């Protein structure tokens, strides 16, 4: 080995030289990788699948397949949207944005709910659900009451001394919410006659066989004497099985979704000030 070769060999064996060469190779590799990644990020591919999706959306919205010219406009709009989307991400516009945050949370909750498919329940489970929520399936209770009407509060107070302990036997049936006998009205019928009002809200809890009021409605003011009230009638499971099943499935999917979220939360270490405990 001649002197020049020996010197070159010793030079290559120097740790500093090896370190510099290795650093240069790593920097070159990173530059190449960054350039390749940037090129991929700036490539938009509109393939047959994307064209079919754009065409399908147009057909669903307008009821017909897009013409070639319309499809060209759809592609141009898609490319423009994709460019703006990628540029927005590159600028970090998705960070610390409450609207985007809520949108992403909503999408994940939707996916979790969509994946929460409960096993078909036994009839015993549905029967228990029916008994736990009778107000959702029972035939509504009915109220029969006497009604004394006044157009305003002052006129209503003038009626108070005229009210007897028990109203006279009704001679007619009221259909307009004013003075008369109102027999066997369901809550829906009460709303139809008196509107959503303090009277309609209070009626189910008014005491029996005594005058109550004055209570306001959309018509005016009322004194009410509830003669009778029938309770909710809980049907047999066979009569409302489909409704009970649908309601149970909704409740069970909500429970399974909450459970899935709890599992995700359990995978995080939450640091909070002393004295504050995060609730599930």
Image (tube, helix red, strand yellow):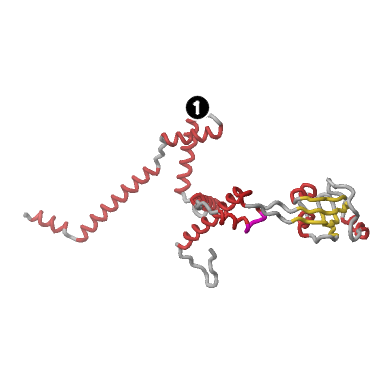
The answer to whether 129 is drawn above or below residue 80 in the figure is below
The quarter of the displayed image where residue 122 is located: bottom right
Q: Name the residue nearer the viewer: 85 or 227.
A: 227
In the image, is residue 38 part of the stretch drawn in magenta? no
Where residue 172 appears, as percent x and y from the top left, is 88, 47
Q: Residue at x 52, y 72 (%)?
A: 274
- Residue range of the region highlighted in magenta in the rendering: 131-135
Return the residue at label 1. 67
In this rendered view, identify the residue nearer to me: 150 or 163.
163
Q: Position of residue 90 (x, y in %)?
A: 44, 48
Of helix, strand and loop, which one carries label 1? loop
Horizontal side of 106 relative to 139 (left or right) equals left
Which residue is painted at 54% across and 53% down in the image?
102
Q: Is residue 133 magenta?
A: yes
- Can residue 166 be seen from the camera position used here? yes
Eyeballing the image, is 207 above or below 186?
A: below
Up the image or down, 68 lies above or below 100; here it is above
- Residue furthest to the bottom in view is 275
Q: Characterize the magenta stretch by its predominant secondary structure.
A: helix
Q: Position of residue 66 (x, y in %)?
A: 51, 29
Neighbor class of circle 1 (other Cα within 10 Å; few <14, some 14-19, many 20+) is: few
Please say whether residue 93 is visible from this viewpoint: no
């Amino acid at each position: 080995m001649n002197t020049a070769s020996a010197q070159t060999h010793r030079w290559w064996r120097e740790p500093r030289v090896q370190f510099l060469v290795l650093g240069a190779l790593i920097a070159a590799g990173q530059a190449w990788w960054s350039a390749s990644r940037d090129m991929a990020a700036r490539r938009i591919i509109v393939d047959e699948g994307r064209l079919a999706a754009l065409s399908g959306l147009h057909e669903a919205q307008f009821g017909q397949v897009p013409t070639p010219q319309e499809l060209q406009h759809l592609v141009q709009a898609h490319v423009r949207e994709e460019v703006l989307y990628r540029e927005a991400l590159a600028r970090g516009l998705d960070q610390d944005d409450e609207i985007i945050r809520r949108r992403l949370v909503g999408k994940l909750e939707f996916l979790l709910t969509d994946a929460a498919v409960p096993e078909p329940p036994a009839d015993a489970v549905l029967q228990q659900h029916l008994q736990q929520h009778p107000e959702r399936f029972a035939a509504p209770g009915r109220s029969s009451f006497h009604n004394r009407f006044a157009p305003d509060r002052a006129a209503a107070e003038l009626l108070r001394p005229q009210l007897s302990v028990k109203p006279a036997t009704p001679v007619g049936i009221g259909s307009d919410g004013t003075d008369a006998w109102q027999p066997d009205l369901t809550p829906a019928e009460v709303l139809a006659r008196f509107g959503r009002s303090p009277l309609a809200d209070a009626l189910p809890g008014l005491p029996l066989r005594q005058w109550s009021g004055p209570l306001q409605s959309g018509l005016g003011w009322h004194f009410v004497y509830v003669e009778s009230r029938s309770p909710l009638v809980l049907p047999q499971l066979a009569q409302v099985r489909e409704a009970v099943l649908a309601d149970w499935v909704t409740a069970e999917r909500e429970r399974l979704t909450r459970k899935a979220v709890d599992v995700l939360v359990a995978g995080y270490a939450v640091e909070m000030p002393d004295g504050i405990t995060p609730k599930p």
